[in-house]
Every structure is written in structure tokens, then in C-alpha cells.
Image (tube, coloured by chain):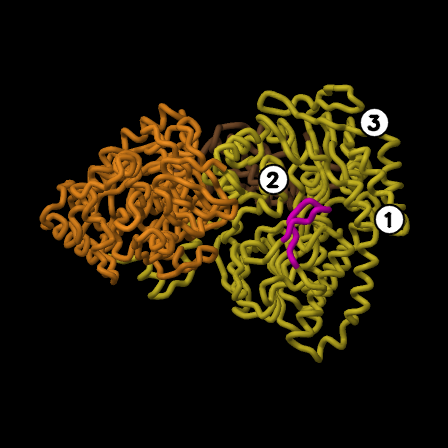
Amino acid sequence: MRTDYDVAVVGGGLLGSAIAWGLGRLGKKVAVLDEGDITKRASRANFALVWVQSKGLGMPAYTVWTVQASQAWGRLASELKQQTGLDVALQQNGGFHLTLGEDEFGQRTELVKRMHNQVGAADYKMEMLRPSEVKKALPLIGPEVSGGSYCPLDGHVNSLRTFRAFHTGFIAFGIDYFPERPVSAISKSGGEFRLTTPQGELRAAKVVLAAGNANQTLAPMVGLFAPMGPTRGQVVVTERTVPFLPHPLTTIRQTDEGTVMIGDSKEDELDDRTLKPSISGVMADRAQRMFPHLARLNVVRNWSGIRVMPQDGFPIYDQSETHPGAFVACCHSGVTLASNHAFEIARMVAQGALEPELVGAFSASRFGGAGAANSSGY
Amino acid sequence: MFRRSEQDKRPEVQIFVDGVAVAARQGDTVSAALLASGVDARRSTAVSGAPRLPYCMMGVCFDCLVTIDGVGNRQGCLVPVAEGMRIEIQKGKREIGK
Amino acid sequence: MTVAPKREDYDVVVIGAGPAGLAAAATSAEAGLSTLLLDENIGPGGQVFRAISSTPVTERNQLGADYWVGADLVQSLRASGAEVIQRAIVWSLDRNLDIAVSIGGASAFVKAKRVILATGALERPFPIPGWTLPGVMTAGAAQTMLKSSGLVPDGRTVIAGQGPLLWLLAAQILRLGGRIDRILDTTQRGNYFAALPHAFAFLTSPYFAKGLSMMREVKAKVQVVSGVTELAASGDGQLASVSYVAGGKRETIPADLLLLHQGVVPNVNLAMSAGIEHRWDDLQLCWSPVLDASGNSSVAGIAIAGDGAGIGGANAAVVRGRIAARAAVEALAPAAAAKLPAMATLRSDLAKAERGRVFLDTLFRPAPQFRIPSGDTIVCRCEEVTAKDVLDSVAIGATGPNQLKAYRRTGMGPCQGRLCGLTVTELMAQARGKTPQEIGYYRLRAPVKPITLAELAAVPKSEADIKAVVRG
């Protein structure tokens, strides 16, 4: 194994891959250490939204960061296309959150109002629409739809293909990807980090922890802190059908392949090998009320996945005081924020320091030891 | 591709394949009736549009997908024919309302 | 016409009405246990006894005596009082023995004290170039049509592959007056030597005499080419020809129908989705559940009988069904077990039924080139993923079938990996220099067969379920 890396990225999911790819793009010598086939991977259990609306209530900086990511996604998609030939099917023509019944409409209206009134947040033109207006964009909605919120910045992407594009790009950038190499210990000596793996030690000048919920255990090894509050979500996927949904929704999207993905649930569970059909039932019921024609489609997959969720729901980007050169990055929105991770976080890691004006608000110091209630707006 | 054995004395059942009357036998599955009928029953896949016919006839391969009485993507090898059943050969992805 | 289960709770639910399921359900119900038998097909019989109650093939010798054994099993089942539902598609089974079953487009939910899985086998994938062309089918498919609809091939027909079923099918097609132009035998020459040490058991098994006479019957009428080492189907949107190499010589023959067969493998989807532990079987080259001598799996209360427990053939399946059912009776109604054949008797019946199996497994072990494709040959029929696509993904970091999904969508189509899973495991194992056991298999989850969104939406829900989704 080579031991001379500029940066070792721990975690080869979407977040770690985006940062590693971004570092490779800047000419850095990068190693990515990843786990194997069976592990809790949010990168293959996500909803693939590039999503802005309703994010950042309680932390205006998160709104700004999200809007920036959304705006940079086009550049990421085109660079990936140019490098790998893979079209990640980015679509950013606005997205909806639909409501069923007047109560839900009222609640959503309240949320939109609170978002607008938040000082310091970027204006992302989220607005409430009545069914007649929704119908102009989404002609197949059912009679129970009471309206919904719309944000022109929202979109979605093929997240699995994005993952593949990053990994394909690794080759061109000379990034070494080491799967099945979990990191059990990290220490710093002689000005470099030593990462212990079952296959031996790997040495690098810098280390980025991008291991999802495992960051909680890894971070303290280099004087960092990443309090996670993992949650389980379920997704129902149908067979392919002809395109019918020109905009993604928070809970329904049609992939470029034609399948319909239906989300999203949230439970305080950690076991992604099981799921509750009754919860999928609620999701399915709501989906068919939003789009009655979906009722006849066949469900071909139903899965659960563990979200990577910092305890207060907002991203954590931090650098170590005690172990200079060590960084931690974890967030729920690994798809939405991929562009920021590839361009901004990678740049900051390369230059050796996070920029407080961009990501200072995301330091784990905000927890002061105890996690706040989840209020990310997710 | 296939023909019926002379000892088959089961009663005839009339089905319609893309609007054309086809004689099946009671107890046939939709897929068996299509393969016995001589009509071009090739569907095209939802992925590339490649032509396919049933492969396994036992419910596992999903290459027998067909629209039956207006409902798309049914496994023709698991559904018995019924008098007057309307079959449509599927082309590509499942359509809205089917 | 659609019949829902009569109760919500059963002592025993048997899934699959092939030889194992028929025997298990009859045994369990005869012993007085409330028993529900759920089966996907139109009638009972599974694959081996398919259409046993309805076949239009009335000349009994054409299907053979082994087939009509099924009629007795069905009769015993009918007499046993077991509740039987056909066209019932079990789409979920979990560790709590909660079962979701789709019947006539609506789901019912039943709970069992014991579950006996008798979901049988499916044909091993045979991924050769052109195997997705219309006109290429499994031998089992042709046999299904022959038994249930009296259909026989009448165009230019080639049968390729190996194994007992292939010869049985050929004999049945010929007896019914169907056409076979050529049989391409892919049995590896080396297998004959490898199988030799197991020959004695085979010679004294019932398979031997029957198999030999069937092969003689077929070879008298059809040209058989042995030692076939390469095989490909081609045509433009429809099978037009089959080309093969035998003895180093390539030949291409025109064909309308190519029937492929290289043995059967356990149908693991429902068992795996229930969380039952499986291990790679190096002899049978497939995943087999880890079971005790009574068929009990790693999930308490779920037993597996029949070919789903590891390929053993119909006779073994019947006995395994009785063993699993007897174990259930012993657990739930010990007094009633006394009336059943003793476990020792059943175990000795099983040993007899399994005699010769190792010989068959060794002789008919499929050659690597027919299991592990290369280049543009399709591996995943649903998502149309080729062997090269899989290898390219391995090259950029795919470690196993589940990561491969993320790179290429293999196994994410409607068949849920049934037609590509084994190929993917073996292909990745070869590419990575690992064992199939190390590579692993797709993580399978309910629904194991597609159900409509409306059907899923009708699943009973609690307040907590709604709160997990509607969060304001």
C-alpha cells in the first residue's frame, strides 16, 4: 500500500467521494478508505433531491449554503459529464411539496411564512400554490391535493449515477480507492496522520472524516466532535412508467429511468435490514392520493436506509485544533450539497483551513456538548 | 414456435390480442395462449426497447409482461385466459392509466 | 371467485404447493393442525407436477409415471382438510411469522405459529450471448407449456445444456409428437471422471435405470452433440441461429426455438427476505439455507423443505416436506405426532431419496463459461446490464452485489435478481479473486413479488405509522 498521500478521506460514499474528487481535481494525491458491500450506506439509500425549500429554519447559514450548492450543481454535473461521459440527469426546474387536506396546507403556509421571516436567510422564492395553480405544472394531481409549496431552485439528480461518476472520475484524477478497508484508529505523529486498517497502516498529511454516522467514533481520535442522531427512512420504488412528473416533490419523484420513488418516513431506528410495510403503506396511500393513476403501478422495491443526521439536523464541517490537518464533514444532504463538497470543502481542505465566513456556522462547537432538538426543516 | 397436441380436448376460449380474435384453450395461461397463437407477441423492454418473449414461464423472469384487460405489466405466465379477455402487447414503459 | 384466508392465525402456513408443500400441508392438516397452503400457480403441483389436476395430456405414459405421483399427493392434500389457496402470491414474510399475501389484487395478512417454506427451485441462469432473444427459453418453460397446455415445439428446435430434466423434457416432447432438431450437450468431459467415485450410489439409485432408458429413447430419434464448449444464440430481434463449438469445431445451425437448461437452484428470495441465513454451496454452486435435520432455518419457526432447502429432487422434496411438518406437529401438538411416521423412518426415506445426488451434482456441474459470461453478454435481463458493465464496475471499486446495484442497477428490476444474482456473485468472485461466500448476495426485501401501490396502501396502519410519514 502507498503511504504518501496528501489527503486520506475516510468514507467513500457520496460525501467522501465528492470531497476526494474535488481534491483530486486540484491535483492532490488522495486515498479514499471505505467499507465493503454490506454497511449502512446513505449513498445508495437516498431520495436524490437537490433540494432547497424549507431548509435552514433555525440556521440561516444553512439556507445560504444550500442555495449556493444548488447553484453550483450545474457546474458539477457538466464537469462530471465531460470527465466521465456520464450524464447524471440533473434537473433543476423547481420542485413541489404537496399537501393533502386543509390542515396540511395551513401548516405548510405557516412554515413558508416562518422561513421568509427568518433574518439572514437567502431568499429562495418559496411560495404557496393552490390546486388550480399546481395543476398547471402537475396535471395528474388528484382531487385531495389541497395545494403545496413551490420553490424554483429545487431539483433532483440521478444519485446512483453521480456516485458512479465520482468513482469513475477517481481513476482520471489518480485517486486511490480502497474498499473493504475500515479505519479502526487514527493518530498523528511526525507531522502525518497514521490510519490503522486491517490491511495495514496508511499515512497522509491530512485526513478528512466523511464516514457518515461512523464519524461519531472516528472524530474523537483526532480531537473532533460529531454528535449524530441517526434516523431510519423508508422508500417505495415502482416499476418504470412513461414520464408523468415534470417536477420532483419532497415525497415523490420520477427517476430519469422511469421508476417512481416514494418517500419519506422517519423513525428512531438503526436497523436497515428490516422495514415496516405499514409505514410504506402510509407512504403509498399518500402517493396515490396525490396522483391517483399511481395506484395501479407495481411496487418492485421497498427499502429502508439510515440517514446521516447530525444531532441538530444541520451539517457539521470542522477542523481539529489539537490535530491540525484533520477535518470532519457530515451532513444529511449529501446529494444536495455534493457540489459544495466537491468545490468548496475540497478547496478549503487543500489549502489547510476551513473558511469561517462560509462554513463557520457548521462547527461542532455549536453543540457545546449536548445536542439540540432537530429543527433542520427536513 | 409451438403447436397443440391432438389429445388436447379442452374447450376453446376466445381472447383478443391487440383487437384481433385469438383462439385459446381453457386452462391456458395468457403467455401460453400467445405463444401457441402464432401472433407476434414480442413486447419491447422499458429499458432499451429490445424485443422479448417469455423466458421462464414460471413467474420469475418478468419477460412475459403484458397488458391484460387494460392493466399493464402483468405476468402473463401466471394469469389464466378468460373468455373475451383483452390482451395488448406492451411496447416500452408502462403507460399512464394502464 | 377470489378466496381470502378463512382465519387470521394458523398453526402452520405452507408456502408453495409443489411436492414438498403438498406433503407438508397434508401431514400437518392430518395431524389436526390448522393449516393454510398458499401457492402462486393456477393449480397445485409446483413445477414437477405442474397442472397435475388439469393437464390436457391424457395419455399417461407420455408424461411418465413419476409425474402422476403428484396426483396422489394432491388427493392426500384434499383429504387432509388443509385450506388451500391458489394464485396466492406471498410478498412478505418476517421474523414474527407475519405473512402478507396478495390474492386477486388484494392483500391478506395472516400469522403462523410455524411456517414451512416450499418455494422450490428455479432454473439456473444460462447467460450465453443472445439469451434474451425472443425464441430463447428455458427447458422448464417448454415443459410447463407441455404439461399445462399440451404444447410442443414445432419449429426448428435446439435443446442445449445438461442434466436429467433436459433428457426428460426431450423424451416428453418426442412422445407428444413435437420437433427437436438437435441436442447440444454441454456436460464437461472431465465431469465424468470427477463423478466416478460417486457412481456406485448412483447405480443403485432409482435415477440410473430411468435416466439411461430416457437417454436411449431420445438418442434414437435426435442428433445429440456432446462435449459442447461454446454456445451462442443470434438473430435480429428474433432467434435465427444457434452456433456452438464441439470438439474444437464451430457449427451454426438455423433455429426458431432454443431451449436452455443447466440444472436448477433454490429459489431463495422469500427465505432471504425473511432474514434466513444462507451459505454458498460449492458442489451445487448456489445459495442454500442453513438448516437443521428437520429443516428448521436460522429464523425461529420457519422451516424450509423441498428444493429450496438445497436441490434434492422431487422424491426428496416429498420426504423433506413430511419431516418439516412432523417437526411442526411435534412442537405444536406432540400427542398427534404419534400417529405420524416416525422421524427415524422419514430420515431413512430421505437418505434413500437423496441417493445418487452427489453423482448427479458432480456430473452435471455446469462449466464455468456457461455460468460466468464475458463481454457484451447480458447478465441482468431486467436492467440490461452486460458482463463487461459488471467488470468495469469492479474496476472502479464495486465490491459485491449490493454496491454493484449503486453502480449499475443490476438486480433492481422486477425479477429482483432471480435471473442475475448467481451470475453476479460468481462473476464478481472471479474478477476479485474471492469466493462466492465472501462476495455475498443481494440484500432482499419484501415485496418479494411486485404488488400494486394500491395494495401496499391498503396495509393496516397505526397512528405511529402515520406520524412517521406525516410530520408537518
Task: Report if residue B89 is visible in the image.
Answer: no
Q: Quadrant of residue A81?
A: top left
The magenta span reads C279-290
Q: Which chain is orange?
A: A
Q: State the separation of the CA atoms marked 3 and 2.
A: 37 Å
Q: Chain of mark 3?
A: C
Give the label on residue C429, or none.
2
Residue C289 magenta-highlighted? yes
Q: Colour of chain C?
A: yellow
> What residue is drawn where x is 78% and y is 24%?
C246
Q: Judge whether C213 appears above or below A366 on screen.
A: above
Q: Are marks 3 and 2 in contact (CB under 8 Å)?
A: no
Circle 3 residues within 10 Å: few <14, some 14–19, many ≥20 = few
Quadrant where the N terminus of chain C sits is bottom right
Using the image as rendered, state which of residue C299 and residue A347 is in the foreground. A347
Percent coordinates x, y for residue C164 in the rendering: 79, 42
Q: SS for tag 2? A: helix
Circle 1 residues within 10 Å: few <14, some 14–19, many ≥20 = many
